[in-house]
Amino acid sequence: MNLRLSPALLLLSVSLGSPDLAAQEQTIKFATVAPEGTTWMNTMREFDTAIRKESGGRLGFKIYAGGVQGEDKDVMRRIRRGQLHSAGITGFGIGEISSTLRILDAPFLFRTHAEADYLHETFDDEFAREFESNGFILLGWAEVGFAYVFTNTPVRKPEDLGGTKMWMWEGDQVAEAAFRTLGVTPIPLSLVDVLTSLQTGLIDAAYGTPLSSIALQWYTRVKYMTHVPLANVSGAVVVAKKKFDALPPDLQEILLRNGKIYMDKLTRLSRKENEEAIGTLRRNGVEIIEVDDPGLRERYAEIGKKARESLAGVLYSKELLDRVESTLREYRQRAAERP
């Protein structure tokens, strides 16, 4: 739900320069809201180093980090104007390329990382074509992670959310559908305004990954995290097809191959760090509310299905939703039958 959470937009931007820049044939201008010093940016630095080395200095990124080029929607607009070429984006930004791809952020769709991996294995060729038909090349998925609800009053059952002043990323139709189905009227704000709004009381609840809640300092203004995944927030690194097509074939191959390598690495690291972040939240006074009651879990699943169906025909087709849900049902059935 695009619940884009993973990145932060506080810090500054650092351009990854190179002493060989003058001799470089192809520079890809890349922007993201992720700040320097995070695993996101450390992995992007490794990606940049790898392509510079393999290409003999002919290809490299110029990276603008920390949201200095704006949030996802701003970055996508700059790419379309030719001011930038590439971006690291969350599901919200992916939706700026194709609303169909927001299926990956659909509420309560995934229960485990293994399910998300299997769905990608099944649909990735189709999703890559969707990017390309809309003017972008997918360099790699960079999963942000499972998003949870953070509140100042304990939330176990859906009704407990009713009295919260819940933030929603401004313009995010997936988040809006999820919360309205949960009986909440969310308050739309820019990502950069969330912390201040928590401090002033304009909102008293937000959603994000454990890692992003720490990176954005939201955890200092909330008391509880409900341990029921609201969504698995997707992320990706993309490059404008026009820029990609202008590259020589050997540089295209270097870019694509390394994109997959380093974005796969980023997803693995992100999952590990999000698990570790839950422990950090506990140590800093955030109570993790476990929802072990199968009946409550089933109610959340039913709410998710209703929210997903409300978006069919709006963001993605009913046919795609049916195929995705059927694929996951079959996967769960096989998993349940394994000894």
Image (cartoon, rainbow, N blue to C red):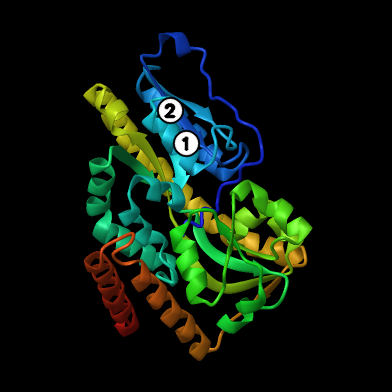
Residue 162 sits in quarter: bottom right
For mark 2, what is the residue? Answer: 84
The amino acid type of the residue labelled 2 equals Leu
Residue located 37% across and 71% down the image? 310
CA gap between label 2 and label 1 equals 8 Å
Name the one closer to the observer, 13 or 261.
13
Name the one closer to the observer, 155 or 237.
155
> Could you say whether the residue bearing mark 1 is in a helix, strand or loop?
helix
Residue 223 sits in quarter: bottom right
Residue located 28% across and 23% down the image? 247
Residue located 30% across and 77% down the image? 329
Q: Compared with residue 47, is residue 117 higher up or lower down, i.e. above or below?
A: below
Q: Is residue 305 left or right of residue 35?
A: left
Q: Is residue 272 left or right of residue 129?
A: right
Residue 71 visible (yes or no): yes
For mark 1, what is the residue? Answer: 75
Q: Is residue 318 left or right of residue 295?
A: left
Residue 169's mark?
Answer: none
Is there CB contact under 8 Å for labels 2 and 1? yes
Residue located 58% across and 55% down the image? 273
Q: Compared with residue 47, is residue 144 higher up or lower down, i.e. above or below?
A: below
Structural crowding at the residue carrying mark 1, measured as other residues with C-alpha within 10 Å and reported as few (<14), some (14–19) or many (≥20): many
Q: First in sequence, mark 2 or 1: give its number.
A: 1
The amino acid type of the residue labelled 1 equals Val
